Amino acid sequence: MLALAACGSGKEAAPAKKDGGTAAAVPKDAAPDAPRIVDARTRPMPAKVFLHGAGRCGECHEKMYDEWEKSAHARSASSPLFKASAAAAKKQSDLACEPCHTPLLAEAPKDVVASEGVTCDVCHTLREPVPSVNGADFRLAVDDMVKFGPRCDLKDHYFHRMGCSPEHKEAVLCGSCHWWEPGGIPVFTEYKDWRDGPASKAGEPCQSCHMPTTKAALAVGAPVRSGVPDHGLLGSAGDLRKSALALAFVVQDQADQLAVRVVLTNQGAGHHVPAGLPERRIVITVALFDHAGTKVSQKVSARGRVLVDAAGKPAPFWRATKVAEDSRIPPNGDLTWDLTFPPPPGAGAVEVTVEHVVASDELAKELGVTADRFPLVTAKVPFGVKEGGAHAGLPKIVRVEPPRPAMGQQKKKGAR
């Protein structure tokens, strides 16, 4: 999930509720083509708003602020990839990203807090979330001094009142932005993929992995409690990406070639991998080295959801007309890549490296940005001189299991 979250459509809005109540549960089989459409940009602005910058919140909630500050939510309005993408989308289409990336702009367009993106006062005033293909279907209760959260055992504080919100423990809170299919183009489908997958059936919402709990004080001076969620979104150690994929790596002789098979299994994520922006990629690099450790050959494969324009050329979501390829790895699913190399003289080694890349080469080049790369897993198979029709040490299979999630991220039995 990261620098670019779901955007909103430019459709006419229905009146927002003002009763301050919580949303009803959304049936999993609700028709995705008939959502309640609420456009944050066209809601009536409240007469008075109560907003505070994240730094102000951090004076009391230091732990949460320190975690949020490093998260994609904190960069939702400032990352180079988002700014370049949002500008291009606005210039080339009628799509707008502000309803989810800077939702407070609709409530207080002149308040500097709105520029913080998905800041504290977004999630903790968020009411009536309704995941749908239209995205950005929620209300922000910024016209009162109530901050909503999952705990219902807290007393009002002099700085703000406490609001009990069961939705803050449910995937619908995330799904109101992390599902968006404008014009039928699947741009963000993390919520839908989770909803239809094994994690949902096992009762594991997004928060169970992305906001693992631990023992901590909710605020400065407060007692240490259990069940306090992490606000970094990538697990308590920031290692959530690495806990998703298992690797099976096979090298063997095949006639006069080295045959390589790479199998990646999504055994740790409750949604498809990669998730988020369609141009995100899982990049697999297989390299061949000679006896001196010099790289003599390399092959690369990028997997993910590929959108194309009317001419069939790869295109970002704001110009795309259809999906040309979807090689993401579903929960509990596999991705297999078979390839061959002519072996070097003598001994050598084959190495596989798997990375998460936040944008495809095509998109990064078009927008003039650098796509961040995150190493996920690597493995190496050495082999000796070929004798009797086979290289010494082959065939060989290497299995690399993903690391266990950090404390607080262990899932319930049966969840994947």
Image: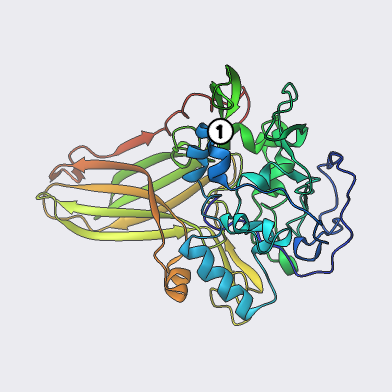
Q: Position of residue 195 (x, y in %)?
A: 72, 42
- Give the farthest residue toward the front: 158
Mark 1 — residue?
61
Q: Position of residue 327 (x, y in %)?
A: 54, 56
Question: Residue, x 61% and y 31% (percent of image)?
Answer: 208
**Residue 244 seen anywhere in this rendered image of the structure:** no
* Neighbourhood count class around disc 1 (C-alpha, 10 Å): few under 14, some 14–19, many 20 upward: some
Q: Position of residue 236 (x, y in %)?
A: 48, 32
Which residue is at the front of the view, 375 or 91?
91
Query: How was the colour assigned to the protein in this rendering?
Result: rainbow
Taking 229 as reference, is 36 above or below it?
A: below
Taking 15 as reference, is 253 above or below it?
A: above
Residue type at mark 1 is: His
Which residue is at the front of the view, 348 or 168?
168
Question: Residue, x 73% and y 36% (percent of image)?
Answer: 148
- Give the farthest residue toward the bottom: 311
Q: Position of residue 104 (x, y in %)?
A: 68, 56
**Residue 18 seen anywhere in this rendered image of the structure:** yes
Question: Residue, x 72% and y 44% (percent of image)?
Answer: 125
With 18 as the anchor, is 403 left or right in this view? left
Dot 1 falls on a residue whose secondary structure is: loop
Q: Quadrant of residue 368?
A: bottom left
Question: Residue, x 57% and y 34% (percent of image)?
Answer: 209
With 386 as the anchor, is 23 left or right in this view? right
